Amino acid sequence: METFFIKALQLIIALSILVFIHELGHYLFARFFGIKVEKFYLFFNPWFSLYKWKPQKPKHRKYDKNGNEKASWRDTVYGLGWLPLGGYVKIAGMIDESMDKEQMAQEPQPWEFRTKPAYQRLLVMLAGVIFNFILAIAIYIGIAFYWGDRVVQYSQATEGMNYSKNFHDIGFEDGDILLSLNGKPIDVKSNGHIWEMIQDGAKIGVLRNHTEHKTITIPNGFLNELIDGNNSLFDYRFPSIVSEIVSNPAKDAGLMPNDRIVKVGSDTTAAYNEMQTSLLKYAGKQTTITVMRGDSIITLHVTPTADGKLGFKPLHWSQIYPTEIKEYNIFSAIPRGWEMGTQQLGMYVSSLKLVFTKEGAKSIGGFGAIGNMFPEKWSWYSFWQITAFLSVILAFMNILPIPALDGGHVLFTLYEIITRKKPGEKFLEYAQIGGMAFLLLLLVYANGNDLYRLLFQ
């Protein structure tokens, strides 16, 4: 029970930060353009609010040159709802989740959203997404500055590296252990070492098959090939060591944490990516896996899923190999934070294609799945890492062109800018209702998956 409360507390705090920053973006941009914001709520408040505050209006109101009353921060009711599924700002003259038809039926006012130029409305709707991504970058900058990076020296990665096609073409082989650059040991903590490795004439020393020393010279023009083609270089190879059993087939097979999978069927699988490739060959078919468990070698019978999965989380390479800390000052932390944020966004976007597979749809989770991302014991490092990642997800998900999300409003506004025709209010009303219904169904499905996994898996 203590573990549940620790995870729940971390989830609520993270959501509070993310929702507040997202809605603050909408609020500030709306206020900047002179739009009245009627409500600013953290969490939803059906039936009642935990807290709300309405500032007193000044005795002397301000007016524009046409005699219209100016919008003010005092127009807004600030509150805290009790339902932690998100938050909202109610922007005057906008068709949103409040579905305030009465206001929309009245004569448009100069301080309303609907009377503002399209580019201003577009920026107001993009502001939440922008603020969430800025928040993620800011958190990653803070992580880099305060904790630095946990790095593994290439020489300590005993399974070597997986190399891109560019590196294969000039003589590297998967599993080569990087040792030296121009006759000196490579120090991963030194800035710019990768840049030096791809310069014309650079000599890179590797250990092949753990016995053979080789030197590979970077050919002239190699950098241009990277720019023109696939610019990936290499990544750590690591053994398939079980961190956590998640679901079947791993459970049925009797796989256990710390087991190392060394063979799938007749294929020797020294590295995790090799194991993944071999499992795909046996997708949906029964086979055997050979594992090292302590000092013993045992054989287990498994039937991988249709997409070649066993249902376990592997140890990350940074948990297997000896790690060191790379420190950043405030200036070097900024580009590192940007790099971390954009990398997380790229990885998340590329993984979305899995959602459209049968297994991917089953893996969709709600608040339970998000809560389980947090550790069982409080860790500020893990908390900020996960919060930053969730901020990236929130930014991307909100920009999807679905009515009721920011992306839906952005889509309709872009349509207006391009065609110079504003969508009708009735159309926007129905689109909003349809979008809200879709999101509600998705919410029920995702949290239903959580409940199913809790009860039956």
Image: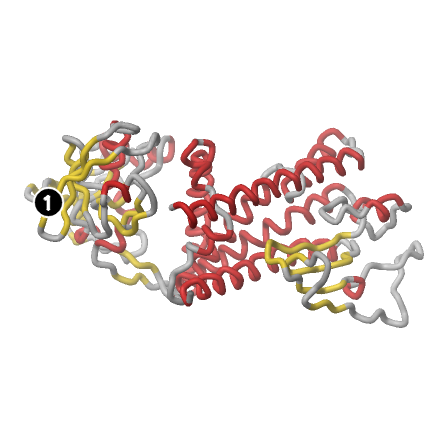
For mark 1, give the secondary structure.
Answer: strand
Would you place residue 295 above or below residue 262 in this image?
below
| Residue at screen point 69% across, 58% down | 45
Residue 148, picture quadrant:
bottom left
Disc 1 residue type? Ile
User: Is 369 displayed left or right of 249 in the figure?
Assistant: right
Q: Which of 345 and 292 is in front in this view?
A: 292
Q: Which residue is drawn at 19% across and 42% down?
A: 261
Residue 302 at x, y percent in the picture: 23, 36
Relative horizontal placement of residue 336, taking residue 296 as reference (left or right): right
Residue receiving disc 1: 297
Q: Where is residue 376 in the image (x, y as percent from the top left)?
A: 38, 63
* Above or below for 78 versus 353: below
Q: Can residue 358 be seen in this view?
A: yes
Q: Which corner quadrant holds the N terminus?
A: bottom left
Residue 296 in percent (x, y) is at 9, 48
At label 1, counting other C-alpha atoms closer than 10 Å, the crowd grade (few under 14, some 14-19, many 20 or more) is few
Residue at the image point whose x is 77% and y is 62% from the top:
76
As displayed, is residue 249 above or below residue 134?
above
